[in-house]
Amino acid sequence: MPDNFTYFIYQLRLPIVTVVFGVFIGFLFKQFVHSWLVKTAKKSKWEGDDIILDAIESQIIFWFFIVSLSIATNEVNLENNIGFLTKDILTQISKLFIVLLIASITHALSKLVVGLFNIWSKGQGRGFPSTSMFTNIVRITIYLIGLLVILDRMQISIAPMLTALGVGGLAVSLALKDTLSDVFAGLHILLSKKVQPGDFIHIDSGEMGYVKNITWRNTTILERTNNIIHIPNGKLSSAIIKNYDSNDPSFSVKIPFGVSYECDLSHVEKIVLEVIAKIQNSLEETNKNYNPIVRVVCFGASSVDMVAYFRGNKYGDHNVIIHQFIKHLHQRFRQENIEIPYPIRTIINREEKLLK
């Protein structure tokens, strides 16, 4: 037994050195080469190089370990079996290392492809949505390809598995009919560009907010009160939706006001336009390319009713615009002695009148 054990240790001396050396080289590569590449990539305007380096960072030492371990296994030359360690077992261990390497590469490749896909989809603007649904589809596709490569490496036939998956998939589709309906409804929403993440929408059922994400089953909406709403994709697909950000996200802001009948309306219009110009130059929420409009609407009960039209960049900007306009207009009207009338109601008591 001691002789066999001594022989065993003697035979493993070179493989152990190979593994230790491989891990050491991997550590040096990560500490120096990879770190230098990361610093260089930060100077680049393209985000893709950061995605590539981030995808391989956690796998570098593991790859060097697996490769060196596979080389070390091939270096073992046993003339006699030592305990459980035989040439057949070494062959199977070597195959296992290759499988682990393929799985690791598949994981890194999925991160890489998903990251590059997100960069590409952002570059398309509204032309192509980037949501967790599409990234999950891409990620699952990469993993399936990696699984097929592993099965082929292990010389396992996939034909029976595909047959079983076909029969099982039919049973699952019947059991998960509603879930699959939401999945295909989500794909329909994204591909038809009905709504996309970031859009501010108003649904006919009353829900209103920003689309945060479109997942397999539901769409997440963030209300302006910071509450989260989860709407099934099937319901959203069949709903009537007002999308404030579709095509041109800017929109008109209508602000009514009134002045006294004694006022010079031309002078009032001039003052209002000056106030609007001041607000447009000071607020980022206003659309600078839009020429503001002031219109006289009608003769009111106690005032000449007028309307000022702004244009905001996106939905939600109207609150700031209205606030600033009313505040500045009120201040300017007081400086110009322009009266803002208010209704006056006279109440006559019939009983007191009869007594008199």
Image (tube, rainbow, N blue to C red):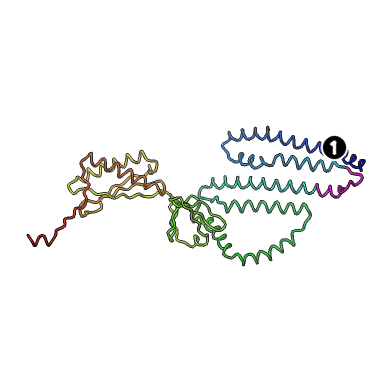
Quarter in which the N terminus is drawn? top right
Badge 1 element: helix
What stretch of residues is rendered in magenta?
A: 77-93
* Residue 246 appears in view: no
* Residue 223 appears in view: yes
For the point 73% across and 41% down, which residue is it?
Answer: 63
For the point 71% across and 48% down, which residue is it?
Answer: 103
Residue 352 at x, y percent in the picture: 11, 60
Residue 26 at x, y percent in the picture: 72, 36
For the point 67% across and 52% down, which residue is it?
Answer: 143
- Callout 1 amino acid: Arg
In-front residue for pair 22/311: 22
The quarter of the picture where residue 290 lies is: top left
For the point 76% across and 53% down, which residue is it?
Answer: 152
Check disc 1 and report the residue beneath it: 13
Would residue 22 appear left or right of 198 to someone viewing this image?
A: right
Would residue 186 appear left or right of 2 to someone viewing this image?
A: left
Q: Residue furthest left?
A: 356
Quarter in which the C terminus is drawn? bottom left
Residue 269 at x, y percent in the picture: 25, 44
